[in-house]
Image: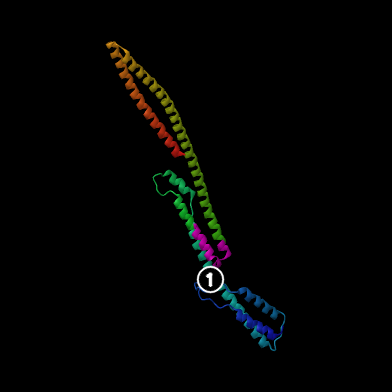
Amino acid sequence: MNWEQLDRLIDELEALLPERQVSVFNPGYHRSDWKTFWAKAGQTQQGFNSGVRYPTKQLRDEAWERFNKVRSLASQRASEEQDHLRDVSESCRNEILSEAESARHSPWIDAVWDKITFSTDKTTVENMKALGRTLASARRMLSEYKDKMFGEHKRECYEKIAEIQQTHDEWWERYKEAREREREAWEQRRNERRERIRANIEKNRERLAKATDALERQRERAAELRSKIAETRSDKWSQIFEDWLSETERKIDDIEESVRRLEAWIEEDGRKLDEMD
């Protein structure tokens, strides 16, 4: 490498120096390509280290001063840019962490509200769904801001979101377990009620069978008494038979009423079983 080539390297390095970005809040603010710049700076430094000779000492000193000036300016701008970018990254991190933290569910809250039964503030499914939407919002913010953030800040956010998600998962797991217990208890109560209804139907069917038999016997007795009334020639026995017939007909009416009532109960319980199934 000769001195003219080294001067051209310095020219190229000056051309690669990123412009100073006035404000980090400028929509056009971006990460500069410092990797390319410092690679070129290293190449230039090697040129000086290799002992390239200039026509005069003054020319070499001017080249060296120019190189150091652009390198110093680059260090200043890179440091300034890094500070600005860190501020942006921290701002994004804080916003995401705040959003995630507002989605936190604390198990002790449920324990407290379990004892304060008159409160309407106990965590509900809708509350948890709302917290879930807030946590999803934090995830969207992280996805949106990640290109502006440092790796350490993104890791903080990922860890916080995972931590909050764990509180949600634990709540939903307890909720599903509680719902399963409720379902099992409800199923048990329904089965017990079904068995009671079936037992009641069976009992009423037995009573209906007995009532039907009794009704048949009373109807046979009434027919027998009517025959005796028609056959007797005795006024005394005719009156006795008529009294017995009246009593028998009253029994028939009562039994028929019982039969209708039992049939209605059996039909009603049958409908209950159908509805339960």
**Residue 8 % position (x, y):** 66, 84
Residue extending farthest to the bottom is 55
Do we see residue 190 in this rendering? yes
Residue 73 as seen in the image, left or right of residue 254: right
Residue positioned 36% across, 24% down in the render: 255
Which residue is painted at 51% across and 52% down in the image?
168
As shown in the figure, which amino acid type bears the numbered disc 1?
His
- Relative to residue 100, is residue 83 depicted above or below? below
- Specify whether 267 is left or right of 19: left
Our reading of the magenta stretch's main secondary structure is helix
Which x, y percent locates residue 94? Answer: 50, 62
Image side of residue 66 versus residue 229, left or right = right
Chain part drawn in magenta:
135-154
- Can you say which quadrant of the picture contains the N terminus? bottom right
**Where's residue 13, x and y in %?**
63, 80
In front of the other: 191 or 35: 191
Between 92 and 76, the one nearer to me in the picture: 92
Circle 1 is placed at which residue position?
84
User: Crowding at label 1, few (<14), some or many (≥20) Cα neighbours within 10 Å?
Assistant: some
Task: Identify the residue shown where x is 44% and y is 30%.
Answer: 201
Above/below status of 162 relative to 224:
below
